Amino acid sequence: MPIDLPTVWAGLIAFAVLAYVVLDGFDLGVGILFPLFPERRDRDIMTNSVAPVWDGNETWLVLGGGGLMAVFPVVYATVLPALYMPIILMLLGLIFRGVAFEFRWRTQRGSIWWDVGFFAGSTIAAFMQGIALGALVKGIAIADRSYVGGWWDWLSPFSILTGLALVVGYALLGATWLNLKTTGGLQERARRIAMITGVGTVALIGVVSLWTPFINPVYFDRWFGWPTAFFSAFVPLLVAVCVAALWHGLTTDKHLQPFLAALGLFVLSFVGLGISFYPYIVPGALTIEEAAAPESSLAFLLVGAVVLVPIILAYTGYAYWVFRGKIDPEEGYH
């Protein structure tokens, strides 16, 4: 039985994007929460909690973006012009955030301004990721395999909503991460913030989920048509399980459980998007098969992916294992 290489590559790129969202999401969330922790010592501990892993987490963004260009060049050529502005702003936010992360340790007097930069870069990057997602879900105007929409098509009430949802969701990941990695007053405040952002995240997921099926008839048929509705119904049920686990963990002062439950919410939301999109890679415009590069290119690139992806997974897992446990407030990043 021949391997369906376009579908395999679609799965690999989807995995890379999901890995980026759940891994870089919590350290972006830590930056988003900076204004709620005004003490320098608390902010130092917060950045120490992500210092060993934050730049490695962005490996998955490079893998997803580079893989998209190589494997689905038509998607790269049509979606990128539609999303130039949010993507450029996202990258600028990530760059400025990285600079601020390093420079805030090099000065005492100017540290507050780099802290503002770390917060602004994290928030802008998260918001623009949500904007880009919302624009993609809403639909990209494509004709003859070229983008034919306007410069501002990416900006709509729905994309603003998804941008806000991602910022609040990342804040939840950041708060549950701090609840997992810190102690004392900082951990207690993070736990309280996680309760508030948890409620906000679930509410926004609900609004986006109710809105999405009415954007495109394909989404509506996928979620409410038979037999796909039978399988789609499991997603909201599992979301309810994650919400219960999140609330139970936070109210009983568990540390790992809330973080895993928050990650579960993101994974299930991503699965819901996959159910809505498949077999399209650009909703309503291009299927996975139509957008794929030649089979020979896919096979050649897959050899590299089979080697590199396990290596990335191995060193990522090793980094998290080495730096497991609570942060020592007296030690950290220098």
Image (cartoon, rainbow, N blue to C red):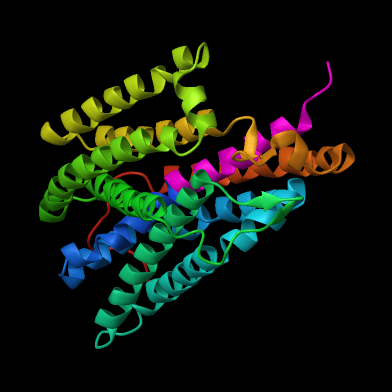
Q: Is residue 252 left or right of residue 169?
A: left
| 246 up-or-down from 307: above or below | above
Q: Main secondary structure of the magenta part?
A: helix
Point 50% across, 12% down: residue: 226
Q: Position of residue 130 (x, y in %)?
A: 42, 53
Q: What span is in magenta?
A: 1-22
Point 64% across, 43% down: residue: 311
* Extreme-right residue of the structure: 296
Work out whether residue 241 or residue 229 is closer to the camera in this orientation and state it.
229
| 244 up-or-down from 292: above or below | above
The quadrant holding residue 215 is top left
Can you see residue 322? Answer: yes
Q: Is residue 223 left or right of residue 305?
A: left
Point 36% across, 34% down: residue: 209
Q: Position of residue 78 (x, y in %)?
A: 68, 55
Q: Is residue 71 left or right of residue 46?
A: right
